[in-house]
């Protein structure tokens, strides 16, 4: 379940997403999808494109009276900017003489390898699909997956922990400093909801101002800014994923799909690279048992995954986003036709999209977890899946 496909170009008429197989009877609120699309469009450092677009989802099939039918759910998002690209992106007309080919590739972008692979002489044939505009469709799919996960008490959050070379505290450190502030689900909800009202989705207001100043400074120099965001998932049961085959391990599925987000260059789970420098006695989470809680850990260096499976602790993932490769102060390049020295192409672009990427990261994480939950508990309807899920919880209580 939750297999999906997205289609559409950045400046084409619309983006399309099709979720191939959903359980019947899942309640889906369209406004919740639109809320996620709105969240993706926010953040300090976004470009002029976000002033044009006001993303709203259109449901084409698979939903009736707010409930899924078990048939493919298809959705579209109209590109308002399409009106400015009718000639350049026309699907049903011959190319006009006024449409100039783009031939100077950007370092760090799909432009050149895509042109070489597909034998294109116009880089727009590559960049239109490689654009992060496509992530709006994945955000919509993720919003449906989130509503599925909510049926099982699973919540997916994110926050920005680094912009450029400026860092703020990660979730583990925040909880260690304020253990009483984050021991209830409501408090966690409130903390992350408040982040949506901040310019960079960072919980440290002092660091946020410094980060904004850094973005402004690098923007003034014609540069772009990357960073790191962290995903936190609560409410996961033990046993999603598997140790049996490498491709069934949950972290392999998460890493594959999260690395598929545009501009993401690194993924770590739990203590990640920091944990590689620790002795084994400090790198692993000791196991305890309580009659009411069952098995639990006093720490979470593993980030909620052991042996390819969820272990009942919070899932913690960090993703590194490179600076966007479209620069106002363009880098050196070479023309793909004349082979002469050129500067790279300049497209309208963001300066910093890390806060937006964190929302996409939430969406993709939700998709993987929805897929794994459906795989684990099976069933053609949401009622059947929940029945199987509740039976599994009873099994765990008896262990």
Image: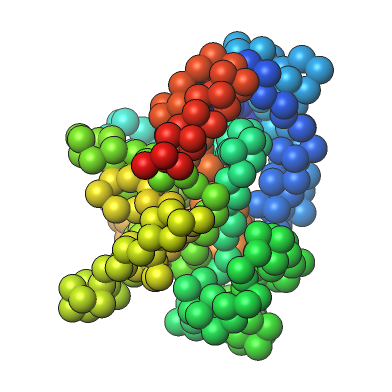
Q: Is residue 296 left or right of residue 58?
A: left
Q: Is residue 243 above or below residue 290?
A: above
Residue 170 location in percent, x, y? 49, 74
| Residue 53 visible in the current orientation | no
| Residue 238 visible in the current orientation | yes
- Residue 256 placement: quadrant: top left
Residue 117 location in percent, x, y? 27, 35
Q: Is residue 203 above or below residue 323?
A: below
Q: Is residue 232 left or right of residue 263?
A: right
Residue in the image at 63% along x and 81% along y? 204
Residue 24 location in percent, x, y? 63, 16
Q: Is residue 24 left or right of residue 60?
A: left
Residue 22 location in percent, x, y? 56, 20
Residue in the image at 70% along x and 45% along y? 37
Quadrant in the picture for the C terminus: top left
- Residue 55 placement: quadrant: top right
- Residue 286 placement: quadrant: bottom left
Residue 345 or residue 158, whichever sits in front: 158
Q: Is residue 94 above or below residue 187?
A: above
Residue 271 or residue 179, whichever sits in front: 179
- Which scheme is used to colour this image of the protein? rainbow
Residue in the image at 73% along x and 20% along y? 67
Residue in the image at 25% along x and 72% along y? 283
Residue 393 or residue 49, whichever sits in front: 393
């Amino acid at each position: 379940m939750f297999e999906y496909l997205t289609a559409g170009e950045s400046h084409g008429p619309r983006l399309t997403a099709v979720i191939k197989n959903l359980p019947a009877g899942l309640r889906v609120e369209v406004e919740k999808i639109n809320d996620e699309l709105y969240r993706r469009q926010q953040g300090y450092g976004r470009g002029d494109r976000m002033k044009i677009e006001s993303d709203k989802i259109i449901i084409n099939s698979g939903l009736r009276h707010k409930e899924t039918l078990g048939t493919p759910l298809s959705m579209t998002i109209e590109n308002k900017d399409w009106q400015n690209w009718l000639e350049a992106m026309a699907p049903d007309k011959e190319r006009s003489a006024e449409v100039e080919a783009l031939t100077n590739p950007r370092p760090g972008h799909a432009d050149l390898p895509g042109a070489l692979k597909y034998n294109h002489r116009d880089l727009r044939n590559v960049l239109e699909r490689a654009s992060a505009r496509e992530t709006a469709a994945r955000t919509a799919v993720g919003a449906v997956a989130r509503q599925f996960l909510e049926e099982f008490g699973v919540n997916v959050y994110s926050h920005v922990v680094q912009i450029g070379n400026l860092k703020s505290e990660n979730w583990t450190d925040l909880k260690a400093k304020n253990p009483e502030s984050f021991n209830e689900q409501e408090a966690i909800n409130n903390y992350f909801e408040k982040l949506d009202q901040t310019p960079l989705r960072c919980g440290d207001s002092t660091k946020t101002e410094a980060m904004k100043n850094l973005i402004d400074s690098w923007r003034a120099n014609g540069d772009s800014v990357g960073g790191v965001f962290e995903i936190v998932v609560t409410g996961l049961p033990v046993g999603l994923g598997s140790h049996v085959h490498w491709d069934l391990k949950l972290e392999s599925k998460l890493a594959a799909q999260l690395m598929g987000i545009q501009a993401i260059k690194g993924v770590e789970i739990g203590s990640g690279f920091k944990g590689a420098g620790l002795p084994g006695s400090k790198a692993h989470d000791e196991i305890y048992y309580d009659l009411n809680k069952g098995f639990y850990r006093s720490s979470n260096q593993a980030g909620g995954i052991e042996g390819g499976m969820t272990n009942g602790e919070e899932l913690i993932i960090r993703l590194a986003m490179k600076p966007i490769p479209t620069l106002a102060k363009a880098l050196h390049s070479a023309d793909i036709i004349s082979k002469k020295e050129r500067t790279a192409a300049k497209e309208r672009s963001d300066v910093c999209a890390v806060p937006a990427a964190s929302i996409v990261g939430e969406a993709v994480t939700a998709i993987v977890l929805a897929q794994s939950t459906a795989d684990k508990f099976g069933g053609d309807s949401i009622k059947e899946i929940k029945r199987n899920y509740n039976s599994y919880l009873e099994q765990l209580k008896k262990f």
